[in-house]
Amino acid sequence: MAPKKFGFASTAVLIVAVLVVVTLIFTRHAQLFSQTHVSAAQAPVTTPATPAAQSQTSAQALPPGTITYQATAVTTAQFLARKHLTESKYMTVAEYVDAIAAVNNGKKSFKRGDTVLIPGIEPQPIVEKSRPFPKDSEVRAIYMTGTTAGSAKGIELVRHWHEAGGNAVVFDIKDSDGSISIPFDHPLAPKRKNHSISNLPKYVRFLHSLDMHVIARQALFRDDNIAQNHSSLAVQSRSTHQPWRENGKLVWTDSSNKEVQDYNIALAKYVASSGVDEIQFDYVRFPAEGNQADAQFAFQKDPKLHRDDVIASFLDRAYSELHPMGVLLSLDVFGVMAWQRQVDLSHTGQDIVKMAQHCDVLSPMIYPSHFFGMDGYEHPGDAPEHFIGESMDRFHKVTAGSGVVLRPWLQAFHWRTKTYSPEYILTQVKTSNEHSGVGFLFWNAANDYSKPFAAMPVIMKNPRVYLHTPTVTVAQNGTASSAAAAGGKTGASGTQH
């Protein structure tokens, strides 16, 4: 019995010893496991390249504004630059590609598993403020479509214009087809994911960095998108009880419809809050062509109202809401309105006397080529001295005492003129300056400004001939100037606004 008992006891001791050893091993392994994961958590974490995905400890380990991206497949610096351009400080993909390469030992291509550093990420949202600007200071501007403005070509165009002596740019926020170049959430806005200017405050900040006066153009009541997709807001046809067409085209909203007006004011206020210095309304009128007798508008329910009353009332409301935001309001008007012909007034509703009361700047579109059959000229496009001088004199007389500034749109395209050249540009600028124009805006629908660029050295070297010189100190945005100024735009290359 004793040996048997001893064998049992030995087995029990052995089992206990094994359990102790196993416990020690498991405990040691658990400690090692825990320490490994703690170390991993404390190391810089590689995540998909979004600021939110960076851990606090990781962000501290990286240079300010730098995030990381772990490639899950072969990728390129160009792909990453496009992906993060909007939230970065860089303006073009090419600039960003070079910056990414610079912090990754010159590499622009990355293999699966590579950790890529992405610099230049900025806190969002970017905030930019409008800059006070005397309304009768001279503006020397070119126009850009929204597509051009948001492209690398547009960035270089602005830099070139700045170097040439330009001090302002006009770019599309909303064009006459209803397209919007910036993200804007509204039931009437076109539904799209990509916008040519994806971060408006950032873009405005770039323009301000070049000391540019920033003018955002907004086409109002000619809006293909609304006319075609929101039929109840379009001009109506008396004969068909369907949306009215201007020479076969469904493009006009009802300028007197409050919902249409509210949409445009909301967009303008949003743009003003993004830091632009001036809101410019284009197509601030009723349709001027087509079967006018067949066109029916909401305001006609009141027989006492006329088209010019509608436009003036809208501008009164828009100006009262925009002006406190610190931006200037400018209006594009037909050059022919300086002649104050009743037929033009009854169609467009652009009563210059009334409009001048609700804006800071009037920009007549005085492209010589657009004065069809006027004043006996067979080729008006080749008579810039006459039409620009006559237009500006008439506008100056009509707006006398209003305090509004006259800043004309000038022709920077060759349509209907055989004499378009740098000298043609110089003639327009000189004539406008001699007839109360305060600065100038160059219009070319294709954004080709080769002739203005060729003329700018002459303009800048001869300021007394071509540039406006204020005689007194003027007030800031929107305050009536003590110096009487003068104030106009018609069309793109062959098209009227």
Image: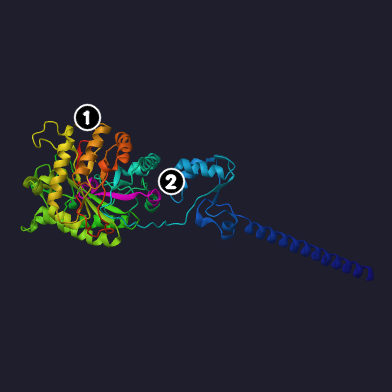
Q: Which residue is mark 1?
A: 419
Count of labels in the image: 2
Percent across and percent down for residue 39 are 67, 58
Q: Amino acid at mark 1?
A: Thr
Q: Is residue 186 above or below residue 390?
A: below
Q: Is residue 40 above or below residue 372?
A: below
Which mark is drawn over residue 43? Answer: none
Residue occupying the far top of the picture: 418
Percent across and percent down for residue 331 are 21, 51
For residue 24, say whether it is visible: yes
Q: Is residue 466 above or below residue 274?
A: above
Q: Is residue 60 above or below residue 407?
A: below
Q: Amino acid at mark 2?
A: Met
Q: Residues within 10 Å of mark 1 (few under 14, many from 20)?
A: few
Q: Residues within 10 Å of mark 2 (few under 14, many from 20)?
A: some
Distance between mark 1 and mark 2 Cα atoms = 37 Å
Q: Which residues are magenta?
A: 205-231
Return the disc, 1 or 2, that comes first in the chain's sequence: 2
User: On the rendered structure, is 29 left or right of 359?
Assistant: right
Please check the rendered image and state whether residue 186 is part of the magenta-colored stretch, yes or no: no
Q: Which residue is mark 2?
A: 91
Which of the pair 64/300 is nearer the observer?
64
Percent across and percent down for residue 160 are 38, 40
